[in-house]
Image (tube, rainbow, N blue to C red):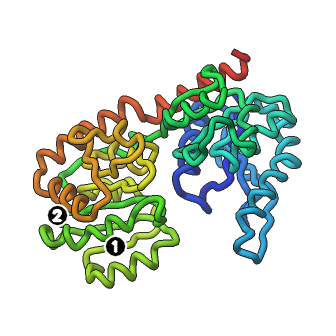
């Protein structure tokens, strides 16, 4: 099959959730000998067309920038949309691409839907995370009407699927699939871990991901386990604030800000506890799933559909939005290593059974084949 994946941000500029999701899917499909094209926005100093392997090509739309920082998201979205229509549609026809797959709503889904109309090519759109949660009312908002152009909509949450149904989207056009985990890369360590204990957070340092809650819990953790190391992996607008706050809490000696890293699998293997603290949703958090695949005991905020992944006391621990409660849950795992081992074993088995890259990839192949066959 020949497949085009649309995603506004992509590696190396955007190394987080959705781009990594697309990267995993693209690599799987390419390894299966499908021809895969990733259509993303252009960036400075990156080639317009980059052939990564014989089966995987990145196509970048024309890059347009503005010195006005507040306007950059709008300029970037506009240039990506126009570039996709004016440049990529010709590329799609020339290469004989059979399926278009947009990721997120306006930042990949919109573009793939519009081009599917122009090129008469089947279109799949994946609604990532809580993308539909902010919309209320009984009718589909005008800005989302492009979803009706899709031949299939993949949701990561049952709440998203229910909302689409309430908007009149046929159940036959909705699939429920969660994120992929490379369980060969994210695997438990071969040897026992050494102390001091390490608690790890991986993700954007933004309020959306909740790193500030972990930082506020650090003094309480250190009161019971003074040698514990708490590390934050990722970048984001809260980083400087978190560093200053760690200084105010006098915990900088135990807190590490590692920035963006390519060796997250190794970092997880050397950790003892992983935390996922979004105040909105954790069930679609790829970093959480990777931590569970690595055999880490996890603590996650008790919100949304998190319980479908983190079953309290079985595959992890759920926590309230309280630094003291979070510190207590983390401390319980540091003190009761038998409990931590049980949770980590169960968590990995859950990922192997339901979230592996192989299962995820095959489900997508089946969807693409149905779209091409028109069934």
Mark 2 lies on a secondary structure that is loop
Q: Looking at the image, is mark 2 or mark 1 earlier in the sequence?
A: 2
Q: Where is residue 89 in the image (x, y as percent from the top left)?
A: 85, 41
Mark 1 lies on a secondary structure that is strand
| Residue ID at (75%, 62%) | 74
Judge whether 38 appears above or below 261 on screen. above
Quadrant position of residue 122:
top right
Q: Name the residue under label 1.
A: 256
Q: In which quarter of the image is the C terminus?
A: top right
209 and 263: which is toward the camera:
209
| Residue ID at (14%, 68%) | 225
7 and 314: which is toward the camera:
314
Relative horizontal placement of residue 47, taking residue 318 as reference (left or right): right
| Residue ID at (75%, 50%) | 59
Q: Quadrant of the N terminus?
A: top right
Q: Where is residue 312 in the image (x, y as percent from the top left)?
A: 25, 41
Q: Mark 2 points at which residue?
A: 195
| Residue ID at (47%, 29%) | 359
Quadrant position of residue 76:
bottom right
Residue 18 numbered tag: none
Q: Can residue 142 be seen in this view?
A: yes
- Nearest-to-viewer mark from 2 and 1: 1
Q: Position of residue 4 (x, y in %)?
A: 71, 38
Judge whether 342 appears above or below 152 on screen. below
Judge whether 97 appears above or below 18 on screen. above
Q: How far apart are marks 2 and 1 (CA)?
A: 16 Å
């Amino acid at each position: 099959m020949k497949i085009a994946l649309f995603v506004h941000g992509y590696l190396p500029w955007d190394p987080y959730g959705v781009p990594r999701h697309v990267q995993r899917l693209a690599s799987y499909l390419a390894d299966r000998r499908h021809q895969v094209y990733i259509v993303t926005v252009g960036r400075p100093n990156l080639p317009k067309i980059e052939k990564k392997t014989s089966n995987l090509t990145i196509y970048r739309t024309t890059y347009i920038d503005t010195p006005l920082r507040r306007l950059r998201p709008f300029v970037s979205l506009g240039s990506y949309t126009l570039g996709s229509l004016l440049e990529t549609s010709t590329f799609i026809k020339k290469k004989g691409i059979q399926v278009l797959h947009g990721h997120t709503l306006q930042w990949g889904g919109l573009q793939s839907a519009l081009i599917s109309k122009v090129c008469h090519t089947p279109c799949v759109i994946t609604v990532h995370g809580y993308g539909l949660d902010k919309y209320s009312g009984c009718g589909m908002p005008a800005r989302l009407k492009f979803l009706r152009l899709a031949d299939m909509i993949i949701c990561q949450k049952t709440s998203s699927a229910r909302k689409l149904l309430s908007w009149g989207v046929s159940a036959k056009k909705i699939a429920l699939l969660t994120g992929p985990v490379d369980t060969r890369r994210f695997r438990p360590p071969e040897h026992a871990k050494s102390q001091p204990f390490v608690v790890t957070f991986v993700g954007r340092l933004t309020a959306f991901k909740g790193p500030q809650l972990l930082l506020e819990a650090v003094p309480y953790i250190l009161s019971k386990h003074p040698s514990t190391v708490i590390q934050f992996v990722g970048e984001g607008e809260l980083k400087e604030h978190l560093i200053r706050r760690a200084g105010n809490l006098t915990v900088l000696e135990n807190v590490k800000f590692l920035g963006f890293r390519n060796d997250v699998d190794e970092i997880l293997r050397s950790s003892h506890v992983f935390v996922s603290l979004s105040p909105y949703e954790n069930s679609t958090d790829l970093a959480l799933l990777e931590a569970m695949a690595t055999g880490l005991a996890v603590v996650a905020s008790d919100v949304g559909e998190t319980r479908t992944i983190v079953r309290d006391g079985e595959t992890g621990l759920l926590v309230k939005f309280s630094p003291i409660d979070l510190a207590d849950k983390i401390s319980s795992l540091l003190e009761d290593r038998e409990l931590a081992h049980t949770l980590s074993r169960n968590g990995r088995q859950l990922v192997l059974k339901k979230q592996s890259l192989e299962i995820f990839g095959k489900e997508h192949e089946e969807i693409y084949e149905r779209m091409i066959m028109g069934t």
